[in-house]
């Protein structure tokens, strides 16, 4: 196996909704989810990666694990959102 | 109307384009787009705790001079009310009680939704409306995420 084939086999094409806008990119399958979140955030926000979650339809992904260890597969669709959507707390 | 209706429609159609063009991808994350027809959007969000969808009607009149408003509906398009375990409550999910627009329906007390800004005058809509997370697709994906937080109950 040459290096090109090896690299190709370890990448997966994903669609990630960032603020509801689909971003289609290739990611290395053993990349930690923490790193994926940082890649998706704008420069000034990367240090706040812990405020965000990356989810598939069923689960929040474990940020300490890789994409493949979270069960993410080629052509999956994920969503990046804030942990806390800024809900108000009102008492009536 | 406060704002130019043509401008409101143009902004609505621009912002809602991903929901139309990428509906299949939204559905894979648990957001099923039912209708996009100015000024209304209807989506069904998969509510994991209930293992079923719940339908949301979003009204974007005066967009984006004013933020969008929204409420839960049944399949007949009528407002869902509390008392039967059909709607969420908690964090910013509010039942029909105390709706700041004084209409008998559920409401959303989250930044970027109209009723929130009716209550929280310290957060100006005009100051946040150009941030992508508060445009229509961003609001829907964040709401879907919040709907499935552990703090949310069915009432």
Image: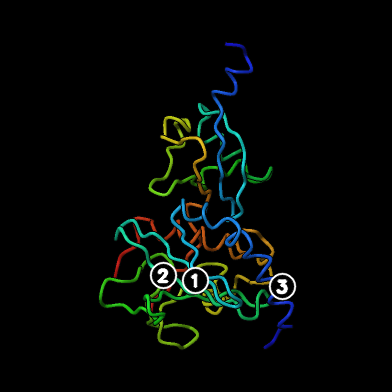
Q: In what element is the residue under mark 1?
A: strand
Q: How is the image coloured?
A: rainbow
Question: Circle 1 marks a residue in which chain?
Answer: B
Mark 3 crowd level (few <14, some 14–19, many ≥20, 10 Å Cα): some
Residue under the point 60% across and 74% down: B67
**Cα distance, mark 3 to mark 1?**
18 Å
Quarter location, residue B151: bottom left
- What residue did someone put label 1 on? B42
- What residue did someone put label 3 on? B10
Question: Circle 3 marks a residue in which chain?
Answer: B
In percent of width and height, residue A14 lies at: 55, 40
Q: Earlier in the sequence, mark 1 or mark 2?
A: 1
Q: In what element is the residue under mark 3?
A: helix
**Cα distance, mark 1 to mark 2?**
7 Å
Q: Is residue B63 left or right of residue B141?
A: right
Up the image or down, B34 lies above or below B9; here it is: above
Mark 1 crowd level (few <14, some 14–19, many ≥20, 10 Å Cα): many
Q: Earlier in the sequence, mark 2 or mark 3?
A: 3
Q: Is residue A60 left or right of residue B135?
A: left
- What residue did someone put label 2 on? B55
The residue at the far left in this view is B84
The residue at the far top in this view is A1
Q: Earlier in the sequence, mark 3 or mark 1?
A: 3
Residue under the point 42% across and 34% down: A70
User: Dividing the image into 4 quarters, which one contains the N terminus of chain B?
Assistant: bottom right
Q: Are marks 1 and 2 in contact (CB under 8 Å)?
A: yes
């Amino acid at each position: 196996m040459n290096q090109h084939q090896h690299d190709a086999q370890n990448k997966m094409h994903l669609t990630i909704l960032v603020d509801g806008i689909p971003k289609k990119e290739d990611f290395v399958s053993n990349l930690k989810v923490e790193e994926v979140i940082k890649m998706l955030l704008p420069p000034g926000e990367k240090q706040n990666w812990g405020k965000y979650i990356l989810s598939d339809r069923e689960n929040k992904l474990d940020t300490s694990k890789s994409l493949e260890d979270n069960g993410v597969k080629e052509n999956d669709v994920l969503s990046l959102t804030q942990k806390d959507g800024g809900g108000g707390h009102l008492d009536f | 109307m406060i704002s130019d209706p043509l401008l409101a429609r143009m902004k609505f159609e621009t912002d809602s384009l991903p929901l139309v063009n990428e509906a299949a991808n939204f559905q894979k994350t648990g957001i099923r787009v039912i209708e996009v027809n100015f000024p209304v959007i209807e989506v069904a969000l998969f509510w994991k705790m209930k293992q079923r969808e719940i339908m949301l009607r979003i009204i974007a009149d005066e967009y984006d001079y004013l933020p969008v408003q929204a409420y839960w509906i049944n399949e007949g398009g009528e407002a869902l009310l509390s008392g039967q375990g059909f709607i969420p409550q908690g964090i910013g999910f509010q039942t029909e009680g105390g709706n700041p627009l004084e209409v008998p329906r559920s409401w959303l007390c989250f930044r970027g939704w109209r009723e929130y800004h009716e209550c929280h005058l310290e957060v100006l809509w005009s100051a946040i409306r150009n941030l992508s997370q508060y445009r229509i697709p961003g609001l829907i994906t964040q709401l879907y995420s919040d709907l499935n937080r552990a703090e949310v109950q069915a009432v």
